[in-house]
Image: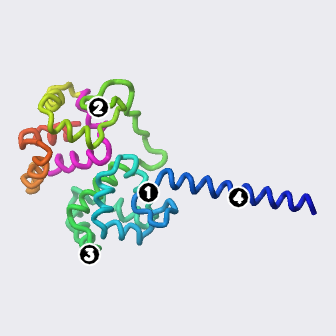
Amino acid sequence: MNNALKITATAISALLLCTLTASAQTNTNPIIGDLDKNGRISRSEAENMMNTPSLKSELFNASAEEQGRYYNALENSIRVRLLKLSRAYDTPRWPYAVEMCRRNGISEIDAEKIALAVRANIGPKRGGPKAKPINDGTPVIADQNGNGRISRIEGENLMRSAELKSKLFNASAEDQNRFYNALEGNIRVRFLRLSRAYETVRWDRTVGFFQRYGLSAQDAEKIATTMQNN
C-alpha cells in the first residue's frame, strides 16, 4: 500500500513539474495573437488577428523570430490557406486570391504583407536544402550590433543615412548579397514589396510610402533593382 502511494505521489509530482515547465515556456515565449496561450493559432484567433488593427500592426512590425513563431504556430487549415496566398502572389492568380481575402475582411495591402511574410518566415519543407548560416563572422553593411542580422530599426536607419546608402550601393555584389540575405522578416517584407512594385502600376504609391522613411525615388529604384539581382 505504501509503495502504491509512493508511486502515485511520484507520478503526480512528475505531472505537475511537466505542467509548470510547459506553462513557464509558454509565458517565456508568448505568441502574438495566441489568446488562449496554448501555443497554437486557431482559425478564430487568426480571424481575430485580421480584425484587430493593433494585433496586425504588432505582427507586421515584429522581429523575424516572433513572426516565425506566429506562422509556425498556425493550425494546418490556416497554414494551408496562407501558403496558397503566398504562392499566388505575383502570379496571374493574385487578383482572385485578393478577392477571396476581401470576402474575409482582409484588404489587398494586408494580403500582400501576409503573403510576403509567409514567404520570409515559413521555411522549406523537410528534406529540402537548408539555409546557410547568416552570421559567418563577416561584417554586414548597416549591421550596428554585429549580430549578422539587419533589423527593422537598422534597415530604417540605412534608408535615412546617405553614408550607409552610398556604401551599400557602391559595395561589391558579395557584400550587397550579404546585406539582403541578412534582412529580418519585417524589413525583408518591405524591401520585397518595393522590388516587386518596380515597373508596375504600384510603383508611385510604393515610392510615396518609402519616402516617409527618407528614401528618395532614385534610392528606392536602386534598392529595388539591387534586390532583384540578389
The magenta stretch is 174-197
Q: Position of residue 86 (x, y in %)?
A: 30, 57
State the separation of the CA atoms marked 1 and 2.
Answer: 26 Å
Label 4 sits on residue: 15
Label 2 sits on residue: 143
Examine the rendering and report whether any part of residue 87 can be seen: no
The disc placed on residue 103 is 3
Q: Do residues under tags 2 and 3 come within 8 Å of each other at their CB atoms?
A: no
- Using residue 149 as the reference point, say whether residue 21 is left or right of it: right
State the separation of the CA atoms marked 4 and 3.
Answer: 45 Å
State the separation of the CA atoms marked 3 and 1.
Answer: 26 Å
Label 1 sits on residue: 31
In the figure, residue 149 lies in which quadrant?
top left
Q: Position of residue 126 (x, y in %)?
A: 48, 48
Vertical relation: 17 (above or below) 180: below
- Using residue 9 as the reference point, say whether residue 151 is left or right of it: left
* Colour convention: rainbow
